[in-house]
Image (spheres, grey):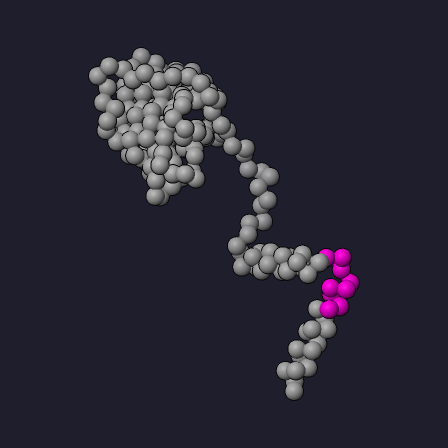
Amino acid sequence: MKLAKRIATASLALVLALSLTACSPKDILGNMILGAADLLGLRSEDTGDDEAEETLATPGGSITFPEGMDTQSRFPNEVYGDTLYIAFNGISNRSTDYFVAAGDSVTITAYGTTESATILQFKAALWELSDDQTRTSYVPGSTVYFETGGDCSTYTVSGLTPGKMYKVTVSYDSGMYYVTGGMTVTGIGSEELTTIDTSEEGA
């Protein structure tokens, strides 16, 4: 008997709530779902307004690998002149060795292809090596997205410190598919690359 009274009371409260609001039952149900998601911690309080906009490379540019460079390995990277050349074959996340920045910016040109029909971009980002060579830190705003249609795109990343050491991380957001292509980074201050094992940035 008590259960029947409780059900009746809950039904009456629901009808009263519907009549006192301008919301449709669909809107109320949606609000209830969102409220439950907030309660369970499934929805972030941040609306995303503070997130940086996605930086897309501009179509154009070209890449010609130096004669004699191995472009068939998984992730070869070599410097010729002021340019770092990178070939990637079936990767999802790889980082180059460290290079010295000649100035306060570098220009990244890249192309890539993938078998995925839904993930149509891959990205490059820069990381700066600390002076004591013990840790790396992400260069804010340096993430650039490239389309996977096979055509070259180009973008200039600024905000670097001349003489400091940096590396490029090439990544593709898929666990099932991989990206294959090439990249150049122009603006290198030395033909020597440095290999250092740091893992704090997780790249």
Residue beneath the point at 55% across and 49% down = 44
Vertical position of residue 172 compared to residue 11: above or below: above
What secondary structure is the stretch in magenta mostly built from?
helix
Image quadrant containing the N terminus: bottom right
Residue beneath the point at 77% across and 64% down = 19
Q: Nearer the viewer, residue 49 or 29?
A: 29
- Asked if one can make out residue 194 in the rendered structure from this viewpoint, the answer is no
Image quadrant containing the C terminus: top left
Magenta region: 15-23
Horizontal placement of 96 versus 109: left or right? left
- Asked if one can make out residue 34 in the rendered structure from this viewpoint, the answer is yes
Q: Quadrant of residue 130?
A: top left
Horizontal placement of 1 versus 77: left or right? right
Residue beneath the point at 51% across and 32% down = 54
Residue 127 horizontal/vertical position (percent): 40, 30
Q: Nearer the viewer, residue 195 or 6?
A: 6
Residue 189 horizontal/vertical position (percent): 35, 15
